[in-house]
Image: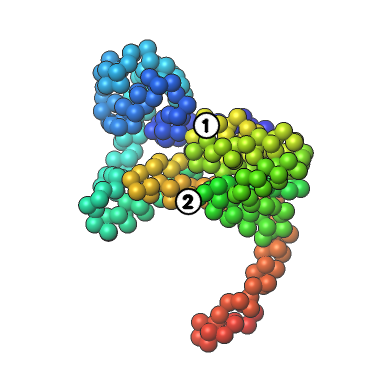
Amino acid sequence: MAAAGSQPREASPLVRIRSLMPGLAPAERRVAAAVLADPVAAARSSITALAGAAATSETTVVRFCKAVGLRGYPELRIALAADAARAEIRDDPRLGADITPTDELADVVGKVAFADARAVEQTARQLDVEVLGDVVAAVAAAGRVDIYGVGANALVAADLQQKLHRIGRVSFAWSDTHIMLTSAAVLGAGDVAIGLSHSGATADTVEALRVARRHGATTVGLTSFPRAPIREVSDLLLTTVAPETTFRSGATASRIAQLTVIDCLFVGVAQRHLDSARKALRATYDAVGDHRLDPATEAPAAGA
């Protein structure tokens, strides 16, 4: 299986820094905060200037660069400059700005839509397709798939369970801690447990994956922070990109990013069972046909 937590090199340096930031040492986090606060200025700064802005040493800046997968400070400056150039061509800086209390409603709509679209785009760009392929293979071959998520993550867990159930895969979604743990305790070899946690630090979800793994199930984590505790209990780790913003519009973006990965996983599994998946989808569609209204008569649509 592919190593948990690997990320393609094509990911934006800011995406990598933001996702790895919680796992950095305190001084390295200050460097990360300085870079994220003004990446254009960081790209133009000397290592001495950046160290001063972060109230740390040049040696710490070098350690930070290596911690985020770069060879040193020159490579960081090049990566930041290239990323800024791409963003200048692609993005409207007004939409990329944070939401403020004085924004007009039309501006709020534009910024929220922009954040959600960027979450999908950046998630797809950095998604490790090799790891995704391993997850698809594991789920396609699984006797049972249990999906864990609490809070907003529970909504995504329910969506994945519904999708898998519709193509005939035995799957369950749990959000109650006790039920998550008891379900994990009866999994075994050949089963898959999937834990969804934007922060990667949701104790209930991490503990459920730990129990499932101890009983022999293949464990999969989905998070925006690849060095978070969920990594330690995941045989396979998939990552999303969804930065938080004012009024927590990032919470919506995080779910959309997760749903993007979930859709990719679902389609991959359906491809492995194409004939049976098609039959199951048709059967489930027909099963609820009588519960759809004909727009013309508001009566049940015949054969809908």
Secondary structure beneath disc 2? Answer: helix
**Residue drawn 63% across the image and 82% down it:** 302
Circle 2 crowding by C-alpha within 10 Å: few under 14, some 14–19, many from 20: many
**First reached walking from the N terminus: tag 2 or tag 1:** 1
Quadrant containing the C terminus in the rendered view: bottom right
- Image coordinates for residue 224, horizontal then vertical, percent: 49, 38
Tag shown at residue 7: none
Judge by depth and name the residue closer to the eye, 217 or 42. Answer: 217
Which residue position is annotated with label 1? 228
Which amino acid is tagged 1? Ala
Q: Measuring 28% from the left and 44% from the top, which residue is drawn there?
A: 97
Quadrant in the picture for the N terminus: top right
Q: Which residue is drawn at 66% across and 34% down?
A: 210
Q: Is residue 84 left or right of residue 135?
A: left
For the rendered model, the colour scheme is rainbow
Residue at the spot x=28%, y=31% of the render? Answer: 38
Q: Is residue 197 shown to the viewer in this render? A: yes
Q: Does 78 appear above or below 141? A: above
In the picture, measured across the screen, residue 145 lies left or right of residue 226, that is: right
Q: Distance between the residues labelled 2 and 1?
A: 20 Å
Report the residue marked by disc 2: 256
